[in-house]
Image (tube, grey):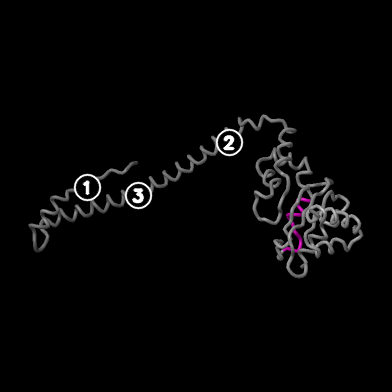
């Protein structure tokens, strides 16, 4: 039930009486009833305000849900949903040239970002493991709080048996720490899948080269050195 005001608000009469009357209030009984009536109206008005605020919040939530529902309906008829999977995969392959795993920005990890859009895109990225196999790691930016770089392991897992392109960039100041060596170990364990390994830091190269895969690493190192320095 909406608010129904009983009080007749008459400021002119009140001001007139305030100017003309003095001493004990005249017509006290009537004034007392008026005050009680106003107090009841105030309580009813506050209750109505609370009810209307609750109603506004409800309507705002409904409006938000309707906007989201409208957007979902538009997605259902969007042109990209009509593209065959083969075409979408080609677009993904172009967009996911390299994934920089240490930036902490989702836009530098296009494969992960794409896989989070919808179930269809997630399934497509997982069905095309080459998208997960092109990686860049800025070695000084590795977090020392995590001996194992879980995001790298996630990418390596989804890359399945695809050839790996890995760039280990920039120079680590001082000695390599456990989190650097952990990344080197995880990458070296998959040396038979390397298509290209680019290494900037000689300390990282030595850590990788201290295994039975030294010949493969040396070839990759020479390729990288020639590519970037013999100009």
The residue identified by callout 3 is: 47
User: In this view of the protein, which residue sits in the foreground, 207 or 160?
Assistant: 207
Q: Judge the density around disc 2: few (<14), some (14-19), many (≥20) Cα neighbours within 10 Å.
A: few
The residue identified by callout 1 is: 7
Q: Please tell me whether mark 3 sits on a helix, a strand or a loop.
A: helix
Separation of residues labelled 2 and 1 (CA atoms): 50 Å
Badge number at residue 72:
2
- Displayed quadrant of residue 81: top right
Q: Position of residue 146 (x, y in %)?
A: 73, 63
At x 81%, y 63%, the residue is 202
- Earlier sequence position, callout 2 versus callout 1: 1
- Earlier sequence position, callout 3 versus callout 2: 3
Residue that lies at the very extreme toward the front in this rendered image: 231
Q: Position of residue 21 (x, y in %)?
A: 8, 58
Q: Nearer the viewer, mark 3 or mark 2?
A: 2
Q: What is the span of residues highlighted in magenta in the rendered image?
A: 146-156
């Amino acid at each position: 039930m909406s608010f129904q005001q009983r009080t007749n608000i008459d400021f002119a009469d009140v001001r007139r009486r305030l100017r003309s009357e003095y001493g004990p209030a005249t017509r006290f009984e009537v004034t007392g009833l008026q005050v009680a009536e106003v107090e009841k109206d105030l309580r009813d008005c506050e209750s109505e305000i609370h009810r209307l605020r609750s109603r506004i919040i409800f309507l705002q939530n409904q409006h938000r849900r309707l906007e989201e529902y409208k957007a979902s309906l538009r997605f259902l008829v969007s042109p990209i949903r009509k593209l065959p999977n083969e075409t979408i995969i080609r677009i993904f392959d172009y967009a996911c040239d390299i994934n920089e795993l240490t930036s902490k920005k989702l836009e530098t990890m296009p494969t992960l970002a794409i896989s989070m859009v919808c179930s269809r895109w997630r399934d497509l990225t997982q069905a095309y493991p080459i998208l997960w196999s092109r990686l860049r790691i800025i070695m000084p930016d590795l977090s020392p709080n995590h001996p194992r770089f879980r995001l790298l392991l996630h990418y390596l897992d989804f890359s399945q048996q695809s050839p790996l392109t890995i760039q280990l960039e920039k120079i680590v100041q001082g000695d390599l720490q456990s989190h650097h060596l952990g990344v080197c170990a995880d990458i070296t364990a998959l040396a038979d899948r390397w298509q290209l390994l680019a290494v900037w830091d000689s300390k990282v190269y030595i850590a990788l080269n201290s295994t039975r895969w030294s010949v493969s690493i040396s070839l990759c190192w020479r390729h990288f050195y020639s590519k970037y320095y013999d100009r």
